[in-house]
Image (cartoon, coloured by chain):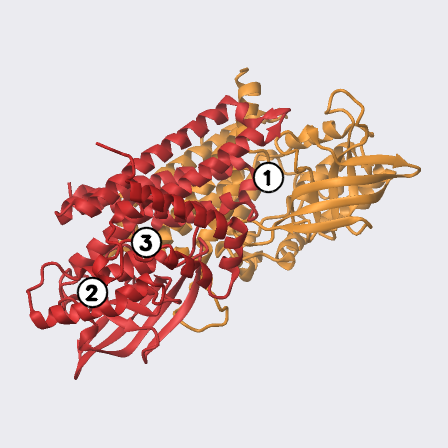
Chain colours: A orange, B red
């Protein structure tokens, strides 16, 4: 048994690391590590740098621009990007819509959408959750009624991340309400966000940043050629997506970077005249998170290793999501704790006032702590992940 | 043993409940937080009319002579309704310094007369809602150590000259008077050499920058640049203020513990209601045992938090030994901080995405509970203080 990367894998990692050092713009990295808001230009800017390098869609087939990397190489690449402080890629096109098109899409759909997703021409968002359908996604009620050569869509999606920036949305809709089993009668539609009848309304979160939205559909006409897979097979598509390509959910690289940042930040904070990192109570908490992360990094590699031979990942993904998000939250909470009482300050009431120095990083810690609470809720809450493990891994 | 509130406390609680219901609905609170001043003059006036501003002030100076125990229902209401008016800063901090003075000072007739004049000038005005106060104490390097003060006051021709920077002074922007700690002697972290002064907000050399805080309250950075104050601005004796600072901060900490209990109760009520009404998979999510047990743990947190908060309020009212009082207050704050973390985080998680939304009150209660975790010292700070005093 060897717990470390093979020599080949290390060479690959060093290659990726070196490339990131040379090509990740400092200003972009700085925004990420300082928790500054990222705008459309930041998100698409990094996307295009990777696209130019040919690394934007490693898992796609080579004919569509994939790199041909194996699963370990893809993992190494993602972890190195996270560790380097690269902006997160918007997953909805690259990692969600595209795999669905590759598996179920018509040739015309592939030719139409994949190159644009590859180049970052369109921002996609995901129309899954509805006010009454969160964890119980199959109960969704947004309807699509066939009329001549198009569907007429009516209903509401919610928690739609970056819908306010998106050009396209992929949606689960109900095309047949009469069927007994609610998973049947669901279809997977691609909808142009500029279509008449779509209204996007911001859904303010408690950290004050614009991130998620409500999307309303009022008699929205969608050409029938925008249905992916057969009508009524949307649930098959959704299930395929859930089990697909999610071995990076633990975000080990990002958490390693956050841990280093936390250590440096805490060392710069003074408690009773000594660095906070010398306080045994704080140090123990810091150590516990680090140890959990050390274990999770190996757990993640073990699970990856099990995928040799093409086995499809199952409940492992859920375990990585649970532990990964718990670590991310613990790091954000320790960062807030390290910031001390002044981390409660959001900023001056009058934004242009000149007074005592205002530390933007310190001021970002509390909103970030609030925002990170979402990680155990989104992408299948950790409760749902535990249900999956109980049922599929433990047979309960 | 008798855990029943007195008749007076019961009547007070009922009148506070009516006030909150009538004047502090959540949407009203949202408007108040977004307003330029960040608090409501009308609500402040109502609080004065209800006698809430004089509740723990001496009866001889316009107050009701109550203790921490008498404020419990008010503090729980403040926590439950997320009241952002400057009650704690004015009444539980600022005015307490004026009301209490140092207990160990030499009896000096002239100084007694000055103190009485100070009390008579300030306390009735506080009780009537005409004066708001704040405690300008915390500094950038202090973290939670009360003795860490670099602001200096040197004796001038006919008074004192204060220089230094105070950070995130709770309700410092709306205060008419600031109670300022400054060093008249010693090094930045010495326990001796601290003094307290009353400074007017518009005294020359005072610069106030209003701040927005995570929990919707306001604070201020306050810079003192060669601020001249008269000799009678001094509270008590020069150089010996730390025991008084500890006493008053213990008092306010006990009260914040009671506030936390109200916030926890409110979060738990919202979460329980959500578990009973939110349906997924055709049933209320509260029918899932995995979630039931978590809700049960939150209910237990509430009971434990309430008990330790009452213990702290009782200690600041009746414990004459300062070390024993501080030990109990630190026990309470350490336990309350744990309860605040658990309840706030679980209330969001059990609400799912809705818990993250600014629209729901529970996300605002989350923010207040998060702030309470750190206010007057986090769990680590108070665990260390508790152990050191044991």
Does A69 appear above or below A46?
above
Q: Which mark is residue B141?
A: none
Nearer mark to the viewer, of 3 and 2: 2
Labels 2 and 1 touching (C-beta < 8 A): no
**Residue A189: % across, % down:** 78, 38
**Residue B12: % across, % down:** 35, 46
- Please state, as top left, top right, bottom left or bottom right, where the N terminus of chain A lies in the image: top left
**Residue A285: % across, % down:** 33, 41
Labels 1 and 3 touching (C-beta < 8 A): no
> Which residue sits furthest right?
A148
Nearer mark to the viewer, of 1 and 3: 3
Q: Are marks 1 and 3 on the same chain?
A: yes
The one of B71 and A135 positioned closer to us in this rendering? B71
Residue pointed to by mark 2: B188
To which chain does the residue with label 1 belong?
A
Residue pointed to by mark 3: A267
> SS at mark 1?
helix
Apparent side of residue B288 relative to residue B368 in the rendered image (left or right): right
Apparent side of residue B387 relative to residue A193 in the rendered image (left or right): left
> SS at mark 2?
loop
Q: Are marks 3 and 2 on the same chain?
A: no
> Which residue sits furthest top?
A395
Q: Quadrant of residue A65?
A: top right
To which chain does the residue with label 2 belong?
B
Neighbour class for label 2 at 10 Å: few (<14), some, many (≥20)?
A: some
Q: Quadrant of residue A271?
A: bottom left
Q: Residue at x 57, y 34 (%)?
A: A247
Q: Which mark is residue A74?
A: 1
Instruction: State whether residue A269 appears in this view.
Output: yes
């Amino acid at each position: 048994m060897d717990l470390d990367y093979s020599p080949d894998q290390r060479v690959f990692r060093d290659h990726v690391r070196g490339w990131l050092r040379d090509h990740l713009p400092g200003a972009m990295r700085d925004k990420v590590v300082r928790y500054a808001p990222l705008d459309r230009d930041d998100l698409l800017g990094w996307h295009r740098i990777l696209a130019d390098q040919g690394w934007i869609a490693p898992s796609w087939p080579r004919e569509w621009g994939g790199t041909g990397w194996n699963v370990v190489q893809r993992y190494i690449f993602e972890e190195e990007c996270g560790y380097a402080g690269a902006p997160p890629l918007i997953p909805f096109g690259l990692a969600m819509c595209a795999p669905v098109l590759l598996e179920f899409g018509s040739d015309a759909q592939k030719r139409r959408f994949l190159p644009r997703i590859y180049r970052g021409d369109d921002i996609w968002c995901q129309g899954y959750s509805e006010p009454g359908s969160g964890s119980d996604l199959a109960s969704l009620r947004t309807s699509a009624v066939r009329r001549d050569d198009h569907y007429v869509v009516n209903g509401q999606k919610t928690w739609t991340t970056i819908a306010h920036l998106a050009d396209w949305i992929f949606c689960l809709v109900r095309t047949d309400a009469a069927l007994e089993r609610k998973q049947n009668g669901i279809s997977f539609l691609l909808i142009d966000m500029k279509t008449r009848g779509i209204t996007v309304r911001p859904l303010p979160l408690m950290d004050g940043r614009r991130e998620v939205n409500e999307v309303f559909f009022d008699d929205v006409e969608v050409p029938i050629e925008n249905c992916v897979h057969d009508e009524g097979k949307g649930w098959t598509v959704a299930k395929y997506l859930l089990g697909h390509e999610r071995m990076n959910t633990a975000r080990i690289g990002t958490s390693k970077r956050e841990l280093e940042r936390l250590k440096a930040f805490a060392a710069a904070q003074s408690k009773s005249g000594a660095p906070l990192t010398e306080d045994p109570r704080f140090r123990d908490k810091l150590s516990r998170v680090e140890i959990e992360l050390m274990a999770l990094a190996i757990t993640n590699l073990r699970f990856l290793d099990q995928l040799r031979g093409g086995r499809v990942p199952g409940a492992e993904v859920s375990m990585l999501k649970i532990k990964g998000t718990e670590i991310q939250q613990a790091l954000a909470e320790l960062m807030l704790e390290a910031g001390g009482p002044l981390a409660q300050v959001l900023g001056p009431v009058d934004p242009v006032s000149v007074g005592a120095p205002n530390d933007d990083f310190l001021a970002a810690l509390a909103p970030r702590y609030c925002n990170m609470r979402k990680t155990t809720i989104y992408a299948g809450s950790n409760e749902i992940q535990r249900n999956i493990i109980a049922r599929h891994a433990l047979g309960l | 043993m008798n855990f029943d509130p007195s008749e007076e406390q019961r009547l007070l609680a009922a009148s506070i409940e009516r006030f909150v219901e009538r004047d502090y609905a959540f949407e009203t609170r949202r408007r108040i937080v977004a307003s330029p001043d960040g608090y409501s003059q009308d609500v402040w006036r109502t609080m004065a009319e209800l006698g809430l501003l004089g509740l723990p002030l001496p009866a001889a100076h316009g107050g009701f002579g109550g203790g921490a125990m008498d404020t419990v229902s008010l503090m729980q209401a403040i926590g439950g309704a997320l009241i952002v008016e400057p009650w704690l800063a004015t009444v539980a901090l600022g005015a307490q310094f004026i009301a209490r003075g140092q207990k160990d000072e030499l009896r000096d007739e002239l100084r007694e007369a000055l103190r009485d004049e100070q009390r008579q000038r300030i306390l009735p005005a506080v009780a009537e809602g005409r004066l708001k106060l704040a405690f300008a104490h915390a500094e950038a390097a202090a973290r939670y150590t009360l003795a860490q003060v670099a602001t200096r006051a040197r004796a001038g021709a006919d008074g004192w000259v204060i220089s230094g920077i105070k950070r995130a002074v709770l309700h410092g922007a709306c205060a008419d008077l600031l109670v300022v700690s400054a060093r008249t002697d010693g090094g930045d972290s010495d326990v001796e050499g601290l003094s307290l002064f009353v400074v007017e907000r518009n005294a020359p050399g005072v610069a106030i920058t209003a701040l927005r805080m995570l929990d919707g309250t306001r604070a201020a950075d306050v810079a003192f640049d060669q601020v001249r104050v008269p000799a009678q601005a001094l509270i008590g004796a020069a150089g010996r203020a730390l025991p008084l600072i500890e006493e008053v901060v213990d008092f306010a900490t006990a009260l914040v513990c009671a506030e936390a209990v109200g916030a926890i109760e409110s979060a738990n009520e919202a979460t329980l209601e959500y578990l009973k009404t939110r349906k997924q998979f055709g049933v209320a999510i509260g029918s899932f045992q995995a979630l039931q047990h978590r809700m049960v743990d939150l209910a237990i947190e509430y009971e434990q938090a309430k008990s330790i908060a009452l213990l702290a309020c009782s200690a600041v009212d009746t414990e004459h030994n300062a070390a024993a009082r501080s030990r109990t207050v630190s026990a309470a704050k350490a336990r309350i901080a744990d309860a605040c973390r658990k309840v706030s985080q679980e209330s969001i998680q059990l609400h799912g995405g809705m818990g993250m939304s600014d629209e729901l009150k529970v996300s605002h209660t989350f923010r207040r509970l998060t702030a309470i975790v750190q206010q007057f010292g986090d769990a680590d700070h108070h665990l260390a203080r508790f152990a050191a005093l044991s």
